[in-house]
Image: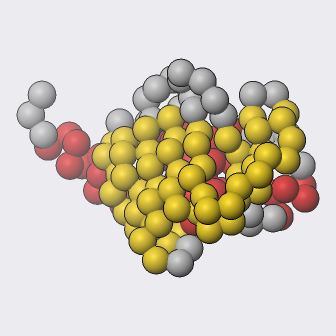
């Protein structure tokens, strides 16, 4: 697990959520709409979008797609519980992502351009330098 603390645009974190949860079944029209986000309830694997204006669109499998405007924050926990990330708005559609990420989540963060491969390498090096 790697500690994450990085600035990231909302769209990048939205893409991370999609890669991590619903890329295989999310409708194409939702994928193209930057205001559509996946949400999921549950003790493990919850995703919550905090926004000024939010409405439910449809539910597919365990994901509820919501239309969210003026997103203030997003809380993400993987089903395994190994990844726990929070995106918090800092200005406009930019924010800060903090938390811990598993290897799979790191891959999705790279694919969504939230973090670079160099950032992940440095985070993993820092982890290996810390005493157990």
Q: Which of the image's four quarters has the C terminus?
A: top left
Give the position of the N terminus as an image quadrant.
Answer: top left
Judging depth in this view, the residue of 41 and 79 nearest the camera is 41
Way the structure is coloured:
secondary structure
- Asked whether the viewer can see residue 115, the reply is no
**Where in the figure is residue 37, as x and y percent of width and height?**
71, 52
**Tag count:** 0
Q: Position of residue 31 (x, y in %)?
A: 81, 57
Residue at the front extreme? 52
Q: Residue at x 50, y 45 (%)?
A: 75
Judged left or right of residue 4, residue 29 is: right
Which residue lies at the image location 50% right of the left edge and 73% below the top edge? Answer: 94
Q: Is residue 26 something one can see in this rendering? A: yes
Vertical relation: 93 (above or below) 128:
below
Residue 104 x, y percent position in the rendering: 53, 38
Quarter of the figure with residue 53? bottom right
Image quadrant where residue 95 sits:
bottom left
The reply, left or right, for residue 97 in relation to residue 92 is left
| Residue at point 14%, 43% (across, down) | 129
Identify the residue at the far bottom of this view: 92
Q: Residue at x 90, y 59 (%)?
A: 29
* Residue 73 percent across, percent down from the top left: 51, 56
Placement of 8 over or under 112, stated as above or below: below
Q: Looking at the picture, does residue 118 appear above or below residue 41?
A: below
As drawn, 30 above or below 92: above
56 on left or right of 110: right
């Amino acid at each position: 697990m790697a500690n994450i603390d990085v600035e990231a645009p909302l769209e990048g974190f939205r893409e991370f959520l999609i890669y991590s949860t619903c890329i295989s079944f999310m409708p194409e029209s939702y994928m193209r709409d930057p205001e559509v986000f996946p949400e999921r309830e549950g003790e493990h694997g919850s995703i919550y979008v905090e926004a000024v204006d939010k409405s439910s669109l449809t539910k597919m499998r365990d994901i509820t797609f919501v239309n969210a405007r003026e997103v203030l924050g997003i809380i993400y926990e993987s089903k395994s519980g190994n990844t726990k990330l929070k995106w918090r708005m800092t200005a406009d559609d930019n924010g800060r992502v903090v938390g811990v990420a598993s290897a799979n989540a790191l891959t999705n963060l790279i694919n969504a351009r939230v973090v670079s491969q160099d950032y992940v390498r440095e985070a993993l090096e820092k982890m290996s330098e810390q005493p157990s």
